[in-house]
Image (tube, rainbow, N blue to C red):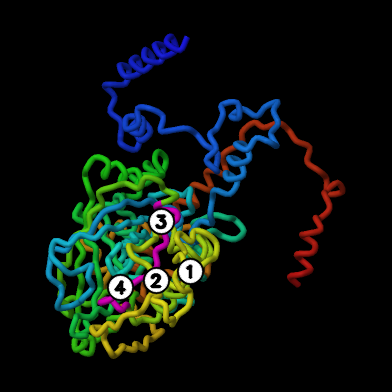
């Protein structure tokens, strides 16, 4: 009997191979088939959580003693808790493994080991994400996107958290919660895109307008993660082996060339493939088209920063051309897809405070806030031992941090758990290359509209790009209600009269079209529906208790 079953199985497999041998599948589509190709036989016995082999009769639980079925309990009780809280922002994304290779000598600027030694390769993991979308959201919205890189260096993990825009939304870390609330879901309607709230926030806090403009332009929707640049935003302080400091902005420049998705293309993709970005990255790597970025740094000396007529530590503006020099560092290459999204991406914890010797970090106040808040959110999502999760573990770590909720890994075994001690526990070292002086930066809350004017007239490199930018602004303003709409038009005129005038004209046309569509819809007779009895005034339902209480509470 077993021989007959084996023969039938062989025939079925052969028929399937003939049927599909001339079909071409994308790598993402054939992921399961690839697994079967790599594992022609079952990979082993199915076990319960404690390793006890699963007997086939335990896989069916109808008319059985379910209480004593350990497989049922193991599986379902684990399934009930297999989700962790999603990120407040940047919830949806994907990731890949790769390496960073040094291509240029930058030792005179920094003694960071990861950036020194031409030809040196450092393993890394990268996570790409959409800022506003929830886990089940779309890839093709116009918004901020992230590219977070974790370098597994010999001196600890270096995390560079990047956006596809070279400027950020605010300088004061206190604004973060309010901005996220304005750009995420409305608390009553639960609708994600509330343009009235978004425009209200950015007109009340014009410091955010510069980044908002970038996201409304072509740069707000690149054609996949592979075709966007990425910027860690801050001005970093770096130092060389002599303790001399420089101030730099890191840039990851895509070697695939930048390209974007138009509004019309996005409408089509949204209806067919909301995971377009994730699919594009996965397929490219599986096909051997390894995406790569050049890492460079725009650089100023301490003397340079005293001569410029703007704040080089202001994350909401670009550095002016002619005030800095650009130095190439190396290449980032992604050559391996993650094997398990939950293990390698969802549990990934990226923290801008994870720095290494030679890169003391940015001195601005936003970075100081991020040092605290990223740690807190990861403690909430993943637990206080999140740096001991596989994907976050550095190459070398010996600490006095012990115990707590798993994972604790080896938990430093039997080493002394206090410092200082006389029994050869881990000891600190003396870094003679570390700068002795620390720059203190005082920042202003003043809003400068000049960077926005420059963006409109110079960063938008063509009239066609400017027109697409204006059309996107107009579409976003159509549903915006007064007085936010008046405030938005006013500030657009203050930024640039041509911008304000063109948006005003386009908005009037769009509003007229909307009024005509609403009038036509109102004039269209309703479909034939079953006649329903309309209650009379006497038969009208009584006001619900909640409505009455709500009115009384709001007097």
Residues at marks 1 and 3, CA–CA distance in whole angstroms: 33 Å
Secondary element at image label 4 = loop
Residues at marks 2 and 3, CA–CA distance in whole angstroms: 32 Å
Per the image, the residue denoted by label 4 is 356
Q: Earlier in the sequence, mark 4 or mark 3?
A: 4
Residue 169 or 101: which is nearer the viewer? 101
Whether residue 228 is situated above or below residue 494 in the rendered picture: above
Per the image, the residue denoted by label 3 is 390
The numbered dot on residue 179 is 1
Residue 9 or 505: which is nearer the viewer? 9
| Circle 1 crowding by C-alpha within 10 Å: few under 14, some 14–19, many from 20 | some
| Residue 90 percent coordinates (x, y) | 43, 59
Whether residue 545 is situated above or below residue 352 in the rendered picture: above
Q: Mark 4, mark 3: which one is toward the viewer?
A: 3
Q: Provide the residue span drawn in magenta.
A: 344-361
Is 371 magenta? The answer is no
Residues at marks 2 and 4, CA–CA distance in whole angstroms: 26 Å
């Amino acid at each position: 009997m077993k021989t007959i079953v084996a023969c039938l199985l062989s025939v079925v497999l052969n028929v399937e191979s003939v049927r599909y041998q001339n079909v071409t599948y994308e790598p993402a589509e054939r992921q399961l088939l690839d697994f079967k190709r790599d594992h022609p036989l079952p990979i082993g016995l199915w076990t319960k959580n404690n390793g006890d082999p699963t007997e086939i009769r335990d896989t069916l639980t109808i008319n059985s003693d379910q209480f004593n079925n350990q497989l049922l309990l193991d599986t379902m009780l684990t399934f009930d808790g297999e989700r962790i809280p999603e990120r407040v922002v940047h919830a949806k994304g994907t990731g890949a493994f790769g390496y960073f290779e040094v291509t240029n000598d930058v030792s005179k600027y920094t003694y960071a080991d990861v950036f020194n030694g031409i030809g040196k390769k450092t393993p890394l993991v990268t996570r790409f994400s959409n800022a506003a979308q929830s886990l089940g959201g779309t890839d093709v919205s116009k918004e901020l996107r992230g590219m977070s890189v974790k370098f597994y260096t010999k001196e600890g993990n270096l995390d560079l958290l990047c956006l596809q825009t070279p400027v950020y939304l605010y300088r004061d870390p206190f604004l973060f919660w309010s901005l996220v609330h304005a750009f995420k879901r409305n608390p009553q309607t639960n609708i994600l895109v509330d343009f009235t709230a978004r425009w209200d926030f950015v007109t009340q806090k014009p410091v955010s307008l510069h980044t908002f403009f970038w996201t409304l332009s072509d740069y707000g929707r690149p054609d996949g993660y592979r075709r966007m640049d990425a910027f860690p935003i801050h001005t970093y302080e770096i130092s060389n082996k002599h303790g001399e400091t420089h101030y730099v902005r890191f840039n990851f420049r895509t070697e695939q060339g930048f390209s974007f998705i138009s509004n019309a293309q996005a409408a089509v993709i949204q209806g067919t493939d909301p995971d377009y970005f994730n699919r594009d990255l996965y397929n490219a790597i599986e096909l051997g088209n390894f995406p790569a970025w050049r890492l460079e740094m725009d650089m100023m000396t301490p003397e340079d920063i005293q001569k410029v007529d703007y704040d080089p530590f202001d994350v909401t503006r670009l550095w002016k051309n002619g005030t800095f020099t650009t130095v190439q560092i190396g290449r980032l290459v992604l050559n391996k897809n993650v094997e398990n999204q939950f293990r390698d991406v969802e549990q990934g914890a990226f923290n801008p405070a994870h720095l290494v010797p030679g890169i003391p970090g940015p001195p601005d106040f936003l970075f100081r806030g991020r040092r605290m808040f990223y740690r807190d959110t990861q403690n909430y999502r993943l637990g206080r031992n999140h740096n001991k999760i596989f994907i976050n573990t550095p190459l070398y770590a010996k600490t006095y941090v012990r115990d707590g909720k798993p994972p604790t890994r080896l938990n430093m075994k039997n080493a002394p758990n206090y410092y200082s001690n006389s029994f050869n526990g881990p000891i600190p070292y003396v870094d003679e290359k570390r700068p002795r002086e620390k720059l203190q930066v005082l920042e202003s809350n003043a809003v400068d509209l000049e960077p926005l004017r420059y963006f409109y007239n110079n960063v938008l490199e063509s009239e066609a790009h400017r027109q697409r930018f204006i059309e996107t602004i107009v579409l976003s303003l159509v549903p915006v209600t007064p007085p936010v709409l008046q405030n938005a038009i006013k500030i657009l005129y203050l930024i640039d009269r041509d911008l304000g005038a063109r948006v005003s004209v386009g908005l009037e046309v769009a509003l007229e079209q909307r009024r005509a569509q609403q009038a036509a819809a109102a004039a269209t007779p309703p479909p034939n529906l079953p006649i329903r009895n309309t209650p009379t005034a006497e038969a009208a339902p009584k006001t619900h208790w909640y409505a009455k209480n709500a009115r009384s509470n709001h007097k």
